[in-house]
Amino acid sequence: MTMPNQKHSSRQLQYLEAMGINLWVSRDFQETDIVADVIESKIDIEPELLLEEPESSVDLPQIMTEQSTDQPKNTLDQLRQEVSVCQKCQLHSERTQTVFGVGNSQSNILFIGEAPGHDEDKQGEPFVGRAGQLLNSMLFAIGLRREQIFIANILKCRPPNNRNPLVGEIEQCIPYLKQQIELVNPKVIVVVGRVAAHALLNTELPMAKLRGQQHYLPETQLPIIVTYHPAYLLRSPLAKQKSWEDLLMLYELDKNLFQSK
Ligand code: URA
């Protein structure tokens, strides 16, 4: 599908390219005169999906750059404090620090990954390494900024050498995530990667069966979208197209999701 007269900054073009969206540049190219062609995507993308630079006020969802100061944040802070001294499993002995989660505690959207890696362990924030940069690009491509959502992991401590989390580690740690879900109270959860999806949905289905459809958090009506982990997308760029389709499901759920509560 060609979108005539869509205007994109060079930064947004980079993000769209990172997401595997083909871009055709008109012969008399100017930065503000680029025709984006998403022929390969076969997705009907509504023009408002492709937003201007964050600095632009046009069509951008309300962005909360500062955390709210009401109750949920304080309670999340208490939980953060509790997590920071957790010694329920052996991972505490090798961590630099716990990685609780980050973002807008009033967001309707909660992203959940697997576990901190080397960079996250050092910085105390989820998804700050290469996978995190791609996650930021994926978010931007659908018109979201990292600050607008809340991001957390199944595990709050880094497994040594980035090995997969052990069952016992997940069992000890997931109650913290469940409390985060209650406190943030999102309208939808986006789970990235097989490990996180299996832990949260209590299933062993392969990604091919999990992605592309809506799930629910067990015993709740809370919708869950499963998509590829950005680290996997770095290794398998062809899968970016499918992850783009998964993220567009957010729009199908509710166009108001991108607003804060
Ligand atoms: N991978 C994850 O699943 N979470 C992070 O925070 C970083 C990388």
Image: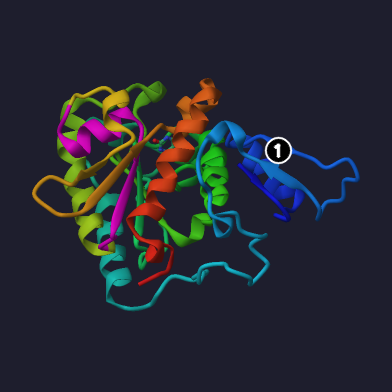
Q: Residue at x 29, y 37 (%)?
A: 92
Residue type for callout 1: Leu
Camera-nearest residue between 43 and 251: 43
Vertical placement of 67 versus 109: above or below?
below
Colouring method of the image? rainbow
Compared across the picture, whether 164 is left or right of 121 comes to left
* First to last magenta residue range: 185-203
Q: Quadrant of the C terminus?
A: bottom left
Where does residue 218 sit, x and y in percent of width and height? 12, 45
| Residue at the disc numbered 1 | 23
Q: Quadrant of ligand 1?
A: top left
Q: Is residue 88 visible?
A: no
- Label 1: how many residues lie within 10 Å, few (<14), some (14-19) or many (20+)? some
Camera-nearest residue between 106 and 39: 39
Where does residue 169 sit, x and y in percent of width and height? 21, 32
Vertical placement of 255 versus 211: above or below?
below
Compared across the picture, whether 91 is left or right of 30 comes to left
Camera-nearest residue between 155 and 189: 189
Figure quadrant of residue 166: top left
Figure quadrant of residue 183: bottom left
Q: Quadrant of the N terminus?
A: top right
